[in-house]
Amino acid sequence: MSAAPAQDPATPAPEPSATTDPTPAPTPTAEPSPNPTEPTTAPCPALPLAPLGDPGDAAQRVTMEPNSTACFTVTVEKPGLHRFVLDGGVPSLTLSSGGTPVSCPLLDERPCALAVGTYTLGLATSDYRLSDTRLAVVPLMAGTSGCPDQVDSGFGTAPTTGTADGAGIVCHPFTAAPGELIASKIQPQGAFANVNAWITDDTGKHLCSVGYDCVLPAGSGGYRVLAHLDSSVPYTLRVRQISHPVGCATVGVNAYGTAPTRVSPPAECKTFTPAVTGAYHVRAVQSSGFPGTLTLYAPGGRICEYTVSCQLLAGVTYTLITDQDVRILVRRSAAEGCENVALGQPHRAALGAPGEVDCLNLPVPQGSQVAVLAASEDAGVTPDLSVVDATGTLLCWTEEQLSSGACGLNGTAPYSLLVERGSRGGATGGYGLTVHRTDEPSDCRTFPAGDFTAQSARATVRTGTGIFGDCLTIPANDHSARELIRVESPQALDFRVLDENGRTVCGGDEWGETQDDCALSPGLSYTVLVPGGQSDAPVEHTLVRRDVTATARGCVATAAAKVGAPSASGAPAADGTLVCHRVTTADARDTLHLDARYTATGNAIGHGVYDAKGKPACEDFGAGCAVSGSTG
């Protein structure tokens, strides 16, 4: 069907006939065709009001040429909101009554409040052809046919199903009272469609958007869901009563070291009533052990949207919306299922079920500082660690913070270490860890003092799967004021040197920094931490610490030469080894230019210059520089 060309508003319109067919266009002749935008005296055909749901024959098909206009007559029988629906085209729409424009912005997108009367609906195209577009006008008020039986808002009931019409408005009523919390969702099935859906009362006005939580405001009459899907597709609709949920399974707190709760039969809704006010860790868990999707509601609405740690009140029933397993943990230390761990001793355990969380009580006082060195066992899990205090407050959670000994326990004692699966490895399996207190002298094995001779003392440490890392002690009475600590093995190694207060004084990393200059205070001991598990296969590393002050051992005495004199020899015996030259001069006012260069045997890729107190005299390890102020 084609709409009639628009009529001249100044020309009285004849009475509309009973047919809905538009007036046929004049037969073309050899004379030039009139401009299609010029008004004619043809009447606008009637466009009947469509019911809710399937619009049936009330949806008219319209075809228009580019840069043309057309019109329909719409008779409103009952005052209220009406929706003008287009399926398959986007012509410009205007509405008038008795020649006076009716103000309805975005006429094809938003409902328009109309009084009883007759209206002219104008359509206009620009530089495109409108082909077989369907057009309907749908009253949105209650009492209009096409709104089927009530939707069941209880949990565990099947979703309501239907097939939308691109030129129609879907309608489904449901029973609820003002002030109640409702969750709703409509989803196209099998094909894409844009959806505009809202909750309304008898008037058809927008009360809440579907897809979002809604505390129902007082309305006129009952409540309904109205929706427009812009293509004819099947859909499902869920309306769920959150304030007084029906059909939910009851769940409780999980002890640490146990599997998440799986309800039988499966339920999309669970309820939980805490016995004690406090912090709880509430999470849905997939079969892989990774977090699932969960929405948590208090009686007044959604809570804890961006965190899994929630403060919940005793005696209040909370609603959990998820069809996955649920894990609810008491986020405070010394909770049910927590085990004790000894400082400095390897602790081996296993996660026996996907989503399980283990808890270890930390035997340290408030204000202390700890390191946790962890690794997976063969075919085990890569543990993800976090530390909480007695109130459930999260204190430390990054690998860098925990492995470097920088985890400060400043919250309320006692404290616990929580262990769950990390992003790598399996969902279940073994793991191991060691906890060290780093704010007091350690009882780790001794890191012997080395020198620049070929027989220098050294320490060996191992990393890899199943190895928790290591720790070494630099004795208080066996170090200089400044030492160079160096990794002398092919693989890079992460290490940290901490003083007796747990403060990091120096260190290297696994990304290539294999040595560091460390300022060590007289009379204090130091702890060297080496994290484990950085590689799949076990790897053995060598660490050497050397005095770089005036008391350094194993250095070659090398007198400063005049400009033009031959360079001193002393190429390292092998790649990665160090040669020490104690450069002397007769006068501290002399300026010495120091550099290392290529030789016939290879390239000196790096060198460092230190003064008598061990402080670096050149900015970079490897760049030449000029120094003065010392005789050696």
Image: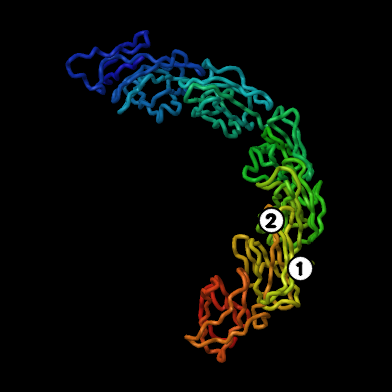
Q: Secondary structure at mark 2?
A: strand
Query: Percent position (x, y) of residue 144?
Result: 51, 16
Q: Quadrant of the N terminus?
A: top left
Locate residue 119 relative to residue 257 in the image: left or right: left
Q: Where residue 396 is drawn, which disc sits there?
A: 2
Q: Quadrant of the C terminus?
A: bottom right
- Could you tell me if residue 253 is visible in this image? no
Residue 14: image quadrant is top left
Q: Nearer the viewer, residue 293 or 331?
A: 293
Question: Whole-Å distance between the Cαs marked 2 and 1?
Answer: 19 Å
Outermost residue, left direction?
31
Query: Percent position (x, y) of residue 376?
Result: 72, 51
Locate residue 68 relative to residue 205 in the image: left or right: left
Which residue does the image show at 52% across and 29% down from the upper left? 206
Q: Nearer the viewer, residue 225 or 419?
A: 419
- Could you tell me if residue 271 is visible in this image? yes
Which residue does the image show at 49% across and 27% down from the upper left? 193
Q: Give the residue at mark 1.
A: 440
Q: Are marks 2 and 1 in contact (CB under 8 Å)?
A: no
Query: Percent position (x, y) of residue 103?
Result: 38, 28
The residue type indicated by label 2 comes to: Cys
Closer to the N terminus: mark 2 or mark 1?
2
Q: Nearer the viewer, residue 473 or 295?
A: 473
Count numbered badges in the picture: 2
The residue type indicated by label 1 comes to: Glu
Query: Percent position (x, y) of residue 521?
Result: 69, 76
Which residue does the image show at 20% across and 14% down from the upper left? 29
Vertical side of 514 occupied by 546: above or below: below
Q: Nearer the viewer, residue 344 or 583?
A: 583
Vertical side of 424 occupied by 599: above or below: below
Outermost residue, top direction?
18
Locate residue 189 relative to residue 290 in the image: left or right: left
